[in-house]
Image (cartoon, rainbow, N blue to C red):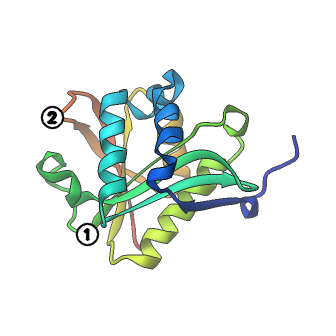
């Protein structure tokens, strides 16, 4: 497989027409290991796709869809967020569904593109992620992307524990 440079990775707007593909990805056990249980992730993506306060994107390589990403104004998630989440923070989530593109910097490049888009197109003061304490690969990827650990957060909705990580606007 030829090297994939960051210039070949792009984010295009996700639409309702992408829902069947996204839903197939979310149903896969490997995606659930990364992103969480199907019912919760389907609800999250549906809320994001229906919101005017979200950037929903399909990750593409050479025009082929390989994953999904979104950035959401964290206030959209309501009361169930950490109390120390600064107002104006956006929550980022993504996954690379195409196994042949994992571990090659695709997720890292997509995360940078999404983070840059949030800071260029919104008044966000910071972006955050909630990476499962069991998913060290995700935590390390977020660290490389400039996110810093704030603390462990117990999600009151699903009882899981995540690293609450933040990257502030430069």
The residue furthest right is: 2
Relative to 154, does residue 167 appear above or below in the rendering?
A: below
| Residue that appears at 40% across and 58% down | 71
Q: Residue at x 17, y 33 (%)?
A: 157
Q: Residue 160: in sight, yes or no?
A: yes
Question: Toward which corner of the image does residue 62 lie, by quadrant?
Answer: bottom right
Q: In this rendering, would 21 be left or right of 78?
A: right
Q: Secondary structure at mark 2?
A: loop
| Dot 2 crowding, Cα within 10 Å, few <14, some 14–19, many 20+ | few
Give the x, y percent position of residue 23: 46, 36
Query: Which numbered tag is attached to residue 74?
Result: none
Q: CA distance from mark 2 to mark 1?
A: 21 Å
Q: Earlier in the sequence, mark 2 or mark 1?
A: 1
User: Where's residue 98, x and y in %?
Assistant: 66, 36
Q: Dot 1, crowdedness within 10 Å: few (<14), some or many (≥20)? A: some
Q: Residue at x 88, y 46 (%)?
A: 2
For the N terminus, give its image quadrant: top right
Q: Is residue 128 left or right of residue 159?
A: right
Q: Is residue 170 visible?
A: no
Quadrant where the C terminus lies?
Answer: bottom left
Q: Which mark is residue 88?
A: 1
User: Residue 69 versus residue 125: which sits nearer the camera?
Assistant: 69
| Residue identified by numbered label 2 | 156
Residue at 68% from the left image edge and 48% from the top image edge: 105
Provide residue 79's location: percent of width, then percent of height. 11, 50
Nearer-the-camera pick, 34 or 168: 34
Question: In the rendering, at what x and y percent does residue 150 appear?
Answer: 30, 50
């Amino acid at each position: 497989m030829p090297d994939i440079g960051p210039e070949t990775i792009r984010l295009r707007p996700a639409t309702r027409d992408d829902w069947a593909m996204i839903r197939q990805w979310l149903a896969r056990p490997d995606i659930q290991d990364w992103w969480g249980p199907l019912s919760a992730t389907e609800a999250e993506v549906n809320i994001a796709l229906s919101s005017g306060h979200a950037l929903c994107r399909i990750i593409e390589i050479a025009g082929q869809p390989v994953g999904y990403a979104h950035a959401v104004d964290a206030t959209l998630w309501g009361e169930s967020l950490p109390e120390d989440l600064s107002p104006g923070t956006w929550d980022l989530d993504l996954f690379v569904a195409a196994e042949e593109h994992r571990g090659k910097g695709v997720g890292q490049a997509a995360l940078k593109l999404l983070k840059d888009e949030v800071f260029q197109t919104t008044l966000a003061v910071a972006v955050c992620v909630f990476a499962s304490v069991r998913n060290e690969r995700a935590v390390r990827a977020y660290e490389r992307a400039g996110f810093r650990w704030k603390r462990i957060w117990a999600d009151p909705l699903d009882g899981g524990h995540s690293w609450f990580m933040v990257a502030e606007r430069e």
